[in-house]
Image (tube, grey):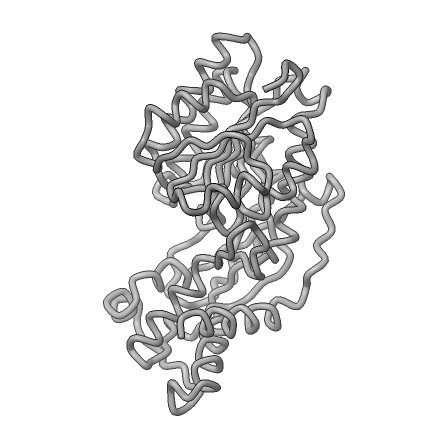
Amino acid sequence: MSQDALPVFFLGVTGYVGGPLLTRLVKLLPNAHVTALIRSEAVIPLYKAAGVHEVVHGTHKDLDKIRTASAAAEVVVNTADCTDVNLTRAILEGMKERYKQTGRRPVLIHTSGANVLGDKAAGVLDPDVAAAPYDDADEERIKTLPDDRLPRPVDKLIFEADAEGVIDGWIIAPPMIYGPSRGPVARETMMLPILLKFSLATKRVIRVGDGTSTWDNVHLEDLIDVYELIIKKALSAETRATRSSPYSKFILVSSGKHTHGEIMEIVAEALFKRGIIPAAEVQQVTLDEAAVVNPILPYVCNNSFAVPTKARKLGWTPKHLTWRKDVEQDAERILESLS
């Protein structure tokens, strides 16, 4: 590593968000020396070819390795598990050690999730929630989000470390993400494959309640644009020279909205086209029934509304606004891979 290189430690680089973000990162920061945590030896050459300089071979359970690599970095990027408290503690312990060594606050770019905004609805739109979306410019409201909402416990660890003055902790909280991932290895978004697999296994598509509960969404490429804007801001001389509230660095993302029912309709239509189910029918069930049949449904049939004021102020303009067409294409691609 040259003396002028910017040491970056990247967790989640092999994932759906991490792969394309790596491609963008190496262009954005040509002087970065990227170290990445990678589990599979088979894919290491692909990620080295894409811009990774050093590899920490291990998993999220290798906390000592993660702590050491975080202590050696000026920037840590985490697009891995946003609910893993032990992983986050190891990252922050390493970053605190870096601060002790250098006297500079290292920068954390952490991926959270919009489920932290979610209510406890069972498939039904709550007009009060829709009328009062969370705006990331309203720091007092972000500060008082309930602790029982995942991934709030991890977010709070980052807020606390930032408040101590030992890191600059930037948290990006995406909603449902769709679109193909163009990283070194093809990956898929999280929710849609799970819904498709359960429906394939049961030959049945279900929704909770009347399906009107509503979430925000964003195309992956538009989300990567947000990361680029935040990384630029986080590393700017002006930002680095000032201290600001931890909550000023919490970033929401949204470019469109969909209902729980609409997503399940897409699943049903995709299965019907392939002759897997006899009709593009979505059956209504209760929350308790859904939890037995498909454990992920209780987490995607609530309401989550976000206003991405901070990204917009930085100039973010999403380009992919035909979410239904794109999600339909995702479903076709995922089913093709499953077959």
**Is 58 rendered above or below residue 18?**
above
- Where is residue 259? Give x, y as percent: 51, 68
**Is 67 rendered above or below residue 277?**
above
Quarter of the picture containing the C terminus is: bottom left
Residue at horizontal 41 percent and vertical 88 percent from the top:
275
Residue at horizontal 41 percent and vertical 61 percent from the top:
300
Seen from this angle, which residue lies furthest right?
Answer: 315
Quarter of the picture containing the N terminus is: top right
Residue at horizontal 55 percent and vertical 50 percent from the top:
184
- Where is residue 58? Give x, y as percent: 35, 35
Q: Nearer the viewer, residue 26 or 117?
A: 26
Q: Nearer the viewer, residue 183 or 42?
A: 42
**Is 4 rendered above or below residue 324?**
above
Residue at horizontal 65 percent and vertical 52 percent from the top:
222
**Is 300 rendered above or below residue 201?**
above
Q: Is residue 159 left or right of residue 86?
A: right
Q: Nearer the viewer, residue 311 or 319?
A: 319
Q: Is residue 66 left or right of residue 8?
A: left
**Which quadrant of the structure image shows residue 5?**
top right
Seen from this angle, which residue lies furthest left?
Answer: 292
Seen from this angle, which residue lies furthest bottom?
Answer: 278
- Where is residue 74? Give x, y as percent: 56, 21
Q: How many numbered marks appear?
A: 0
**Which quadrant of the structure image shows residue 67?**
top left
- Where is residue 20? Give x, y as percent: 59, 48
